[in-house]
Image (cartoon, grey):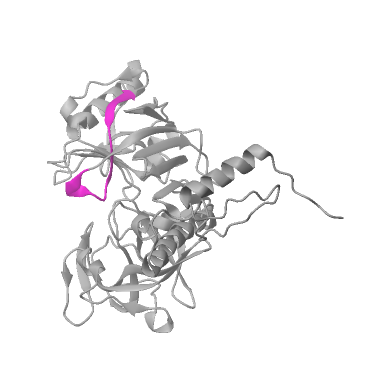
Amino acid sequence: MKTTLSLSPLFLFLLFSLVQGLNPKCDTQDHGSTLQVFHVFSPCSPFRPSKALSWEESVLQLQAKDQSRMQFLASLVAGRSVVPIASGRQIIQSPTYIVRAKIGTPPQTLLLAMDTSNDAAWIPCTACEGCTSTLFAPEKSTTFKNVSCGAPECKQVPNPSCGSSSCSFNLTYGGSTIGANLVQDTVTLATDPIPAYTFGCVAKTTGPSTPPQGLLGLGRGPLSLLSQTQNLYQSTFSYCLPSFKSLNFSGSLRLGPVAQPIRIKYTPLLKNPRRSSLYYVNLVAIRVGRRVVDIPPEALGFNPATGAGTIFDSGTVFTRLVAPAYVAVRDEFRRRVGGKANLTVTSLGGFDTCYTVPIVAPTITFIFSGMNVTLPQDNILIHSSAGSTTCLAMASAPDNVNSVLNVIANMQQQNHRVLFDVPNSRLGVARELCTK
């Protein structure tokens, strides 16, 4: 069967007029209803650039389009990356939340503590002095390499040094000190291999605070997971932390903008150049039960010069509030729990509001710009192992450089989906039960 293509005279007139206007040397004779086909780079093509490109310019243009296309394809591939999360307290006896990561080729599995206030990842390596747990063996990986002193990454770690040709650094983490060599290797989270991921290969550590199998930095700095996978995950992630008592990997770390919750309230993220890794938000008030407690505005205010303000942090266990804010919350909590019964308040370790009889606790609501987060009893109370003592699971900020910082910690984030949308500079929170 023969198929013919019929075109209206008006269409043909417009098409040939366009061609003639672009290049008067083109053939404009009447060809009846015959359709002329021009190659995109033909002198007669209406799609030909108005200015001729050199061979080098053409190649660079194609390369730029390829790069954009690869970024688009990468976003499709990584759209639904989900990494299981568990409480480290039950599995590796560490008060952190952990994810499984495969390091090197062939892969070696370690349980890394996830930390939203740190950037560079670091992992204990063979012959590490002071390391007590599972070690990564770089000599067994075919994709492992050291980072040279001249590499830009060497300038992005704290306290870099170059005793030899490779880069090393040291840092303080809680009550621990860590010395590491800066290296690169393939890191796989869920099913996504990340080649040449830059991290610290720990050679020496002292003190009690170091996560035994290493740390995955989820902060906002240059060597964090967000920065090193910006094209892959588009600087977007969320997590749901299960109860610290859970034995299962029932929580989840979702990487990338796809499959993030739609029904979620947001508050703006704030930037502090002096502490650029931290996720600051604007906490404007705190409600205990139905009453908004009286807190001086400067106790909640954001001040980049002093570091004051409020952050969300996955590494701190119990929420810390600056002294005036904590005292106001604590006193209203005690008033509502005690009531007319005038219950005796005791202390336990760092907690100063504890009871030895069963209590009914009021809700506590953090009021942020554009978002309220109301905490049920499971996010407010902690019980002694014998079950005879119940405490308010918050405390006053320590009397040090962080005395001006309010920290919304992981105990208060449990069974919530916390979404970090860095490109849109916002943080979202929605209730989600992920404890099994």
Q: Is residue 51 left or right of residue 401?
A: right
The number of discs equals: 0
Q: Is residue 22 left or right of residue 34?
A: left
Q: Residue at x 41, y 51 (%)?
A: 234
Q: Residue at x 39, y 24 (%)?
A: 362
Specify the quadrant that holds the N terminus: bottom right
Q: Position of residue 306 (x, y in %)?
A: 12, 41
Q: Position of residue 316 (x, y in %)?
A: 31, 48
Residue 181 shows in this picture? yes
Residue 373 lies, with reference to residue 404, above or below; the image says above
Q: Residue furthest top?
A: 340
Q: Nearer the viewer, residue 211 or 263?
A: 263
Q: Residue furthest right?
A: 1
Residue 90 shows in this picture? no
Residue 50 magenta: no
Residue 184 lies, with reference to residue 263, above or below; the image says below
Q: Position of residue 190 (x, y in %)?
A: 51, 61
Q: Nearer the viewer, residue 29 or 278?
A: 29
Residue 280 magenta: yes
Magenta segment:
272-287
Q: Nearer the viewer, residue 364 or 107?
A: 107
Q: Position of residue 164 (x, y in %)?
A: 19, 82
Quadrant position of residue 11: top right
Residue 300 lies, with reference to residue 399, above or below; the image says above
